[in-house]
Image: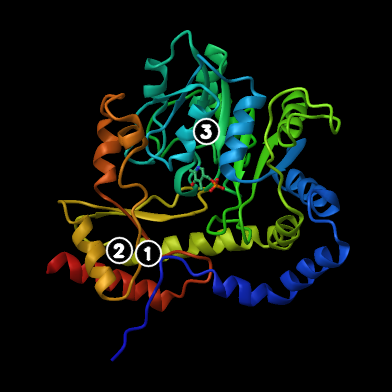
Amino acid sequence: MSINKIPVLDLKPQYQALKDEIKTAINAVLESGQFIMGPEVKRFEEEVAAYLGVNHAIGVNSGTDALVIGLRALGIGEGDEVITTPFSFFATAESIGNVGAKPIFVDINPHTYNIDPKAIKEQITSRTKAIMPVHLYGKPAAMGQILDIAQAHNLKIIEDCAQSFGAKYAGTCSSCQESCQEDTRAQISGKLTGTIGNVGAFSFFPSKNLGAYGDGGLIATDDDQIAEAARMLRVHGAKKKYHNEVLGYNSRLDSLQAAILRVKLKYIDEWNQGRRRVAKTYNEFLADADGIITPELADGHVFHQYTIRVLDGKRDLVKQYLAEQGIGSMIYYPVPQDKLPVYQGQYSANSVSDVLAGEVLSLPIWAELAETDIKRIVETIKQALIV
Ligand SMILES: *Cc1c(COP(=O)(O)O)cnc(C)c1O
C-alpha cells in the first residue's frame, strides 16, 4: 500500500484557488508589453505601502537585495558593525558583509528564537551603526526593547521581515520574559513588522507567507531620504537615467511578479489566519507529547514556520521517522550563521543558538493544511518518540 505523502510545503492548493485571477493578471502584463517596472509595480508598491501603513514601499529583486539596498540606503558600509542574530538564514549576515560592514552576532532568547535584547547592549562599540533583528518563523522580535536600545545609542534598525509579512508587534513582553519600557511598547503596539525600525526588508520568495512565482523583495520606510536612496540604488545608482551618481544594482521587482503579488496581497491576512489555526491545532495535539517544546501562539505571530524543539537528542530520529512515513520536515537552521564555513573560527560561541540548532524541527505548514493531516503528523511524532 502506498502512503499518502505530506510535503513540508504545498503551494498547489493556493494556486488552485486563485488560478483564474492569477492567469488574468499575468495575461494583462503579457498584453501590455511592459515587463520592467511600469504600472503594475507602481500599483503594487502603493498597495503594500497602504497595507503596511508606511510612506514608501520600494520593490526590488529579492529579500536579500532588500537587505543590501536597505543597508546602503542607511549609509552603512566599510568599517561599520551591525548587530544581528546568529539564528537565521545566511542572507541576513551576508547582506551586512556584502556592503562592507561586519556582522556581530549576539545570542537569542530560547523562548522566542529571536535576538536577545539584553545581549545586544553588551556588544555595542563605537563602530556599531545598526541592529538587524529577524522576525524568525514569522514571530515579531522584541521590538520595544530593541527600539529603546537603538534610540539610546543612536543606532539604525533594519528589520529582516523575510518571514514575517503581515506579522504584528503585539506590545506584550510575555514571551520574551524580560522587561522593557512600557511607553515604547505602547507606542509601537499594533504596528506591522517592517514599519517599526528605519527600514523593513521583505522577501517574496515563493515559499514565504506572501510569495511570488519567482524572486522578489521590497523595502519599506517612512523616511523620504532613505526611500530616495533605495529607489536610486535599485537602478544602477541613477535618479535620472544615464546620470548614474553612485554604484548601485540592477535590482527591480519585475512586472509579472508585481501583478501576481497584487492578486495575492488581498488574501494575505486570511492565509496568515489559516497558518495560526494550523499552529493552534498542532499545539493542542502536541500538548501531551513528552520531550517536545511547542511554540507559543503569541499575538501577531504569522507562523511562516511551525517549529518545535525535540529534546534529548531525538530531533534527527524524529525527522528520519517522519520521512519514512512520507512526511516532510525541515531544519531551520542546522548551522547558526556564525558557525558557517565562511566565518571559520572568527566568532565565539552563542550557547542558546548552538543548542537550538540541534533541537529545532519545522513541521509542514500552509494555510489550507487539513486537520486530519496535522493529526497524522502528530501521531507519527509520538510514535517516533516511543520507538
Ligand atoms: C528568505 C530569507 C531571506 C532572503 O530572501 P530572498 O528573497 O530569498 O533573497 C533573508 N532573510 C531571511 C530570514 C529569510 O528567511
Element at badge 1? helix
Nearer to me, 3 or 386: 3
Give the CA distance from mark 3 to mark 1: 34 Å
Identify which residue is drawn at 26% across, 37% down. 354
Is the residue marked 1 within 8 Å of ligand 1, measured from its CB? no
Q: Foreground mark, 2 or 3?
A: 3
The residue carrying mark 3 is 95
In the depicted structure, whether residue 128 falls above or below residue 4: above
Q: CA distance from mark 2 to mark 3?
A: 37 Å
Whether residue 53 is visible, yes or no, is no
Under tag 3, what secondary structure? helix
Q: Is residue 385 above or below residue 235?
A: below
**Which residue bears the numbered disc 1?**
282
What residue is rendered at 74% in x and 27% in y?
Answer: 229
Q: Residues within 10 Å of mark 3 (few under 14, many from 20)?
A: many
Amino acid type, residue under disc 2 in the picture: Leu
Q: Residues within 10 Å of mark 2 (few under 14, many from 20)?
A: many
Residue 286, disc? 2
Q: Amino acid at mark 3?
A: Ser
Residue 350 in percent (x, y) is at 28, 30
Q: Is residue 248 left or right of 177 when viewed as pictured?
A: right
The residue under the point 30% across, 34% down is 339
Q: Earlier in the sequence, mark 2 or mark 3?
A: 3
Which of these two is toward me, 45 or 233?
Answer: 233
Q: Is mark 3 within 8 Å of ligand 1?
A: yes
Q: Amino acid at mark 1?
A: Tyr
